[in-house]
Amino acid sequence: MSAPSTQRTLSVVLSTEATSAVVVRVPLPPALVRLRAQWDRAASVGVPPHVTIVFPFLPADRLTPDVRRTLMAVAAGHRPFDVRFARVERFPTVVYLAPEPSAQFTRLTEAVVDRFPDFPPYGGAFEEVIPHLTITESGDAPFDVIAAQADAALPFSHRVTRLDVLAEAAEGRWHGYWRIPLGVRP
C-alpha cells in the first residue's frame, strides 16, 4: 500500500440540490461488500460500489433524453474492457482499490467531460483524477485494519460493459437511473 495522497472522493463536493453521477459499477466479493457496508457512508445511502467517471454530474432534474443520447454516443466510442483490482491504496480519509489498468477509466472521464465541460470531475477540485473504487471513507475509521481486510479479499476482476448514471433523490438516497452499454451505436 502506498502513502496517502490528497483527497479525491465524492465527499469533497457539497451540493444543495439533488445531483447525479456517471460511474462504472463494480460487483465486489462478499468480504468487501461487508467492509463497505460497515465503513462507507455512501453505501448507506444507496451508492453501489463503483469507479467514478464524473461526479457531480447534472442536477438530477436535468437528466433528459438528450443527455442520455449524448452519453450513449460517448459510450459507443469505447469498447468493453477487463479490469483487475489487486491493490489497496489510500487518500487521507479513504481506503480504496486501484483498478488495473486505469487508463480506460481516465479516457471515459475525458470523453464525458468533453461533451459536458461544465461538469468536471469533483467540481474541478483536482488537477489529476485518480480512478479508484472507495471501500471506506471516514474521518475516524481504523484505516490500517480496513486496508488489511480489503487486501485479503484481493484480487478480483470485472468485465466493464456499461456506464451507469446514478441520481440522488430528494431524501438523499441514490438510485440507478440509466444503464448505458459500451461499444453499442445508438
Image (cartoon, rainbow, N blue to C red):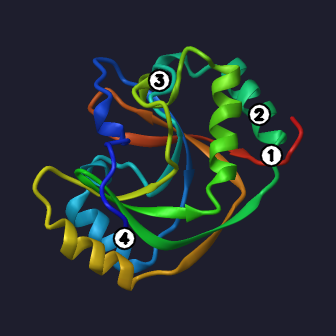
Helix, strand or loop for disc 1:
loop
Q: Residues within 10 Å of mark 1 (few under 14, many from 20)?
A: some
* Mark 2 vs 3, N-terminal side: 3
The residue depicted at 43 percent of the width and 54 percent of the height is 48
Q: Which residue is mark 1?
A: 78
Q: 37 or 98, which is in the foreground?
A: 98
Q: Which residue is mark 2?
A: 74
Label 2 vs label 4: CA separation? 34 Å
Q: Are marks 3 and 1 in contact (CB under 8 Å)?
A: no
Is residue 155 positioned above or below 38 on the image? Answer: below
The label shown at residue 60 is 3
Q: Which residue is mark 4?
A: 1
Label 2 vs label 3: CA separation? 19 Å
* Mark 4 vs 3, N-terminal side: 4
Q: Are marks 2 and 4 in contact (CB under 8 Å)?
A: no
Helix, strand or loop for disc 3:
helix
Q: Are marks 1 and 2 in contact (CB under 8 Å)?
A: yes
Helix, strand or loop for disc 4:
loop
Helix, strand or loop for disc 2:
helix
Q: Amino acid type of disc 1?
A: His
Q: Amino acid type of disc 4?
A: Met
* Mark 1 vs 4, N-terminal side: 4
Q: What x and y, as percent, mark residue 35? A: 28, 70
Q: Residues within 10 Å of mark 4 (few under 14, many from 20)?
A: few
Q: What x and y, as percent, mark residue 18? A: 37, 24
